[in-house]
Amino acid sequence: MVEKSPMFPGRDFGSPCFINYGKDNEGATDEFVYALSGEGWANGNYLKVGRVPVERIMDINAWEFISKFETGRKPVWVNDFKAAIPVLQDSGFMGYPECVYIKSLKRYLLLTWKFKVERPDKYSPDDGSELAIYESPQPWGPYALVTKMDWETPEVTPYNPRLPLKWFDNEKLEGYLLFSGSWRNGGSSEFYRAQVRKFKLELVI
């Protein structure tokens, strides 16, 4: 019997998501796939970056993480995920992230979120949540804040934003935001399901 264990145990790289470059990684800018991670499912403080050759995703020895930056924000990569440093810090907002590459803009769009509570281990489906959006020229930053906002209403308490590139028009800069909603009453809430909202990006010169 094969013993199974987490590839990245603990909170150091505890909630990775792959950066979405499109179907089959078609918009990739190099030979790697990249993953961003907060410290867990919700209300983390730090964002870290990992990468791996596309054909070796399941090989833990092939993964690399940023351990420091040299002059000009050039990343230094190491194999130990526990040595990874944060590339972005925002108290409470580093829940399970979402990041996509907008090829028509040559920018990365990062979506993060938090439940509106003071302690990361104390939240409920009635707390309400906030959405934060950042943009960057590279997976490792520097990330600039685009906006923070109350996200829907406490009745909805949305979480886990996703921006499917399949639904995004690179020319019109229009798409749909996909997210989950409140799980109150044991998951019987009408909002505890996949939801979508249409959006349009506006460039500020």
Image: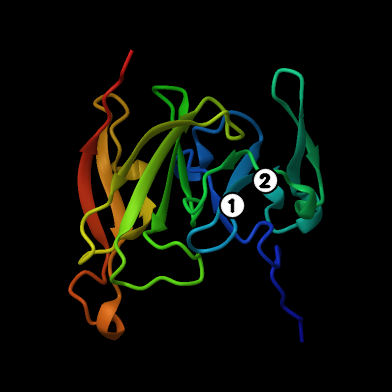
Report which quarter residue 138 is drawn in.
top right
Element under label 1? strand
What is the CA distance from the residue labelled 1 to the residue labelled 2? Answer: 8 Å
Residue at 78 percent of width and 49 percent of height: 62
The percent coordinates of residue 105 (x first, y second) are: 40, 22
Q: Nearer the viewer, residue 173 or 97?
A: 97
* Badge number at residue 50: 2
Examine the rendered structure and indicate whether residue 15 appears above or below residue 66: below
- Graded by Cα atoms within 10 Å as few (under 14), some (14 to 19) or many (20 or more), the crowding at tag 1 reads many
Which of the pair 6/124 is nearer the observer? 124
* Residue under the image location 30 percent in, 75 percent down: 183
Which label belongs to residue 37?
1
Quadrant the C terminus occupies? top left
Judge the density around disc 2: few (<14), some (14-19), many (≥20) Cα neighbours within 10 Å: many
- Residue 163 visible in rendering: no
Q: Residue 67: x percent and y percent?
A: 78, 40
* Three-letter residue code for mark 1: Ser
The amino acid at mark 2 is Gly
Q: Is residue 168 left or right of residue 27?
A: left
Tag 1–tag 2 contact (CB < 8 Å): yes
Figure check: 7 above or below 198 = below
The image quarter containing residue 87 is: top right
Counting from the top left corner in percent of width and height, residue 76 is at 79, 33
At horizontal 77% and vertical 35% (from top left) the residue drawn is 68
Quadrant in which the N terminus appears: bottom right
Identified at 71% across, 65% down, the residue is 7
Q: Residue 145 in the image: x percent, y percent?
A: 43, 32
Residue that protrudes farthest toward the top in the picture: 205
Quick one: label 1 or label 2, which is nearer the N terminus? 1
Whether residue 186 can be seen here: yes
Callout 2 secondary element? strand
